[in-house]
């Protein structure tokens, strides 16, 4: 009841500002960023800046701090509790690991001295201090980014006659954890001209590795980057913002939400950064330290199953929307083609194709157990970006071995070409592997092909719809966790050497569409893998690629989510520290055992007298034998020449 009242108070307070909602400020600089004001609330302390954590905004006055509930605008706590403050001039701050770190100086004292002042964020008790003494100027803001501290020391024209330094001496310094300077930069002329005669007031590292800075008065923000060479920060863009400078902070749990203050009206102002283009998180998008810190922030944004399920729902929508799969395309007739049955020791191979879109063929091979009656599990085996002289992919010996062995264990296995690989040739100016790499909507088409591959398996009368699994390595690992995240029909998954919080995949088919970030969601591949919960999942990682931290970083995060379902034991990690980026024997052996356990396969059919997995009886076929389209079986006339992805 009490909560409801607070909500009403909150709404009343916000009514005068509703007209501002969705007011997008136009960018006279002609850039690609803009800010939309979301809401604001009164805070008498709003003089210098802010810091933001999961639930609270810390409003920083010249000598005081007040902690507000981010969502209700209610003041929770203030500092100091007694009348006298020991501070001279506080500036903007940041929350890191439960502590509020504030910039502090003796402004407008001469000579300038600076310190970092530290409070317990929970209790607002002052707990520590680090003094720089007389060094670089007046400390105006600090932030934490990529495992380092970043701070700006300001200079002002008004002290020029005494200090012989004007606003141009304002400097950004990067520190280590012991506050030792590692590197520093100054601001470009265009930005300095806008600071003059004052200095840089607020700053915070934001999306896409950009530094967002404010001056003291102008309602605009300067988007900067560390330069590839030299000492001057690079100006990316100047963006209008609905607040007149001062300290700012990003709300790390609400993508692209920037919190600042309006000093004149003593208000906290929350705005959203918008882009006129999609936001991609690609390749080595951020450092390992940044990835760990991001996962910590994600983890703090939910504390029970209901809250996680709300987040999961938002992430699924974001992924589907980013992949242009919301709504899904209409399901056309698959018109499957299956031929050239070969029987080997314990398994059968056939060449198959089906239409995932009208006239566009998904091509592959179907492996089945020989002489087995009753319903069977179905397993998808995407192949990943493993090249070989003749094209690699589904034709590679190790891929044939994996599919055939799973079939010998009693499952129906589909190996299917990634787009532009193998026989997937229906592309404008088809040329392998360029057609694959260049297809902009590869995430959409390839994920859709995986969805249709499940449809295809389920058309086979002996496949059990409750026992569908998927496993692939590298790019095939990406295909694995993408499909599991959005398709509830997948019961068990084994993503191999791909689940990483700091690496997003370098190919268009992994990260070329905005699936990881929008103005509604922010995530990484570790969390996408967690969307499989509570369905059984084995995460296979190794010591020599971007999954090297999995046992310490990604796996604990994912297991905690499984724990919310009471299914902590349904997710496992097989980490092979001495191994590299492949789907080699020891990884396959782990996958066979896990899939056998959860899909009721007969492991005994492939285990030798010593208890080892026996793969020797698999016959490696030449590529020519595995082709679904050849002179005897030409691609049907209804095949389109070049596939296109339309938003449905
Ligand atoms: Zn790719």
Image: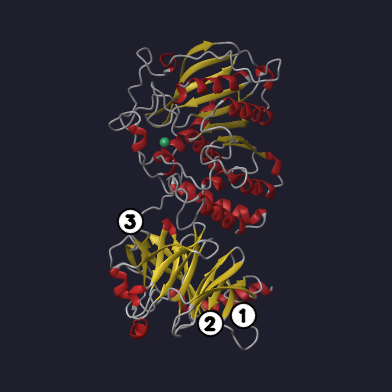
Going 52% across and 71% down the picture, which residue do you hit? 93
Going 62% across and 70% down the picture, which residue do you hit? 121
Picture layout, residue 141 above or below residue 398: below
Residue 25 placement: quadrant: bottom left
Going 53% across and 80% down the picture, which residue do you hit? 43
- The answer to whether the beta carbon of the residue marked 1 is less than 8 Å from any atom of ligand 1 is no
Give neighbour class at mark 2: few <14, some 14-19, many 20+ (Cα, 10 Å).
many
Q: Which mark is residue 45?
A: 2
Which residue in the protein does label 1 denote?
78
Picture layout, residue 424 above or below residue 144: above
| Foreground tag (2 vs 3) | 3
Q: Which of 50 and 406 is in front in this view?
A: 50
The percent position of residue 13, horizontal first and vertical second, equals 53, 79
The percent position of residue 648, horizontal first and vertical second, equals 40, 44
Q: Which of 149 and 571 is in front in this view?
A: 149
Q: Which of 188 and 272 is in front in this view?
A: 188
Q: Do the residues labelled 2 and 1 touch (CB within 8 Å)?
A: yes
Give neighbour class at mark 3: few <14, some 14-19, many 20+ (Cα, 10 Å).
few
Measure how far apart labels 2 and 3 are at the Cα level: 40 Å
Q: In this view, does 514 lie to the left or right of 466?
A: left
Which residue is outermost to the bottom?
Answer: 83
Secondary element at image label 1: strand
Measure how far apart labels 2 and 1 are at the Cα level: 10 Å
Residue 588 placement: quadrant: top right
Which residue in the protein does label 3 denote?
229
Going 35% across and 63% down the picture, which residue do you hit? 233
Q: In this view, does 142 lie to the left or right of 412?
A: left
| Foreground tag (3 vs 1) | 3
Q: Nearer the viewer, residue 10 or 605?
A: 605
The percent position of residue 363, horizontal first and vertical second, equals 43, 25
Picture layout, residue 643 above or below residue 130: above
């Amino acid at each position: 009841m009490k909560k409801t009242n607070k909500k009403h108070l909150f709404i009343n307070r916000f009514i005068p500002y509703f007209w501002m909602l969705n007011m997008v400020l136009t960018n006279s600089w002609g850039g690609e960023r803009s800010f939309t004001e979301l809401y604001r609330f009164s805070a008498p302390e709003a003089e210098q800046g802010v810091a933001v954590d999961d639930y609270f905004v810390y409003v920083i006055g010249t000598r005081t701090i007040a902690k507000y509930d981010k969502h209700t605008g209610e003041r929770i706590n203030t500092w100091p509790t007694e009348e006298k403050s020991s501070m001279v001039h506080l500036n903007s701050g940041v929350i890191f690991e439960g502590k509020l770190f504030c910039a502090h100086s003796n402004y407008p004292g001469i000579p300038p001295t600076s310190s970092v002042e530290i409070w317990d964020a929970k209790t607002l008790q002052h707990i520590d201090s680090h003094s720089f003494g007389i060094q670089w100027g007046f400390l105006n803001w600090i932030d934490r980014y990529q495992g380092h501290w970043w701070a700006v020391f300001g200079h002002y024209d008004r002290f020029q006659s005494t200090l012989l330094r004007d606003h141009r001496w304002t400097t950004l310094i990067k520190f280590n954890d012991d506050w030792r300077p590692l590197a520093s930069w100054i601001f470009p002329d265009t930005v300095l001209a806008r600071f003059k005669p004052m200095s840089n007031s607020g700053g915070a590292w934001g999306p896409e590795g950009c530094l967002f800075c404010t001056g003291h008065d102008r309602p605009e923000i300067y988007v900067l980057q560390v330069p590839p060479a030299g000492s001057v920060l690079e100006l990316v863009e100047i963006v209008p913002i609905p607040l007149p400078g001062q300290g700012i902070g990003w709300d790390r749990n609400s993508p692209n939400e920037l919190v600042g203050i309006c000093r004149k009206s003593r208000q906290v102002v929350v705005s959203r950064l918008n882009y006129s283009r999609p936001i991609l998180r690609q390749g080595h998008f951020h450092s390992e330290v940044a990835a760990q810190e991001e996962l910590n922030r994600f983890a703090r944004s939910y504390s029970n199953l209901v809250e996680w399920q709300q987040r999961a729902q938002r992430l699924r929508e974001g992924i589907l929307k980013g992949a242009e799969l919301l709504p899904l395309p209409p399901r056309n007739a698959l018109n499957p083609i299956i031929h050239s049955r070969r029987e080997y020791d314990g398994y059968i191979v056939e060449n198959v194709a089906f239409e995932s879109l009208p006239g566009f063929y998904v091509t592959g091979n179907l492996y089945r157990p020989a002489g087995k009656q009753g319903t069977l599990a179905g397993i998808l085996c995407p192949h990943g970006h493993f090249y070989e002289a003749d094209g690699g992919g589904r034709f590679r010996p190790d891929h044939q071995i994996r599919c055939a062995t799973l079939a010998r264990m009693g499952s129906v296995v589909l190996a299917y070409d990634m787009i532009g690989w193998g026989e997937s040739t229906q592309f404008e100016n088809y040329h392998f592997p360029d057609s694959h790499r260049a297809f902009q909507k590869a995430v959409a088409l390839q994920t859709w092909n995986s969805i249709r591959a499940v449809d295809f398996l389920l058309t086979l009368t002996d496949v059990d719809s409750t026992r569908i699994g998927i496993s692939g390595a590298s790019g095939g690992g990406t295909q694995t966790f993408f499909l599991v995240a959005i398709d509830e029909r997948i019961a068990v998954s084994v993503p191999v050497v791909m689940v990483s919080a700091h690496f997003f995949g370098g190919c268009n088919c992994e990260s070329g569409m905005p699936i990881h970030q929008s103005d509604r969601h922010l995530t990484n591949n570790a969390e996408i893998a967690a969307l499989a919960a509570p369905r059984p999942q084995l995460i296979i990682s190794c010591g020599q690629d971007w999954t090297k931290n999995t046992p310490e970083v990604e796996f604990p995060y994912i297991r905690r989510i499984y724990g919310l379902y009471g299914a902590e034991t349904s997710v496992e990690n097989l980490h092979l520290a001495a191994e590299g980026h492949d789907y080699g024997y020891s990884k396959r052996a782990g996958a066979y055992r896990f899939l056998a356990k959860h899909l009721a396969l007969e492991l005994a059919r492939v285990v030798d007298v010593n208890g080892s997995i026996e793969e020797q009886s698999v016959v490696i076929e030449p590529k020519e034998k595995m082709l679904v389209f050849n002179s005897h079986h030409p691609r049907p006339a209804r095949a389109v020449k070049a596939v296109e992805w339309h938003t449905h």
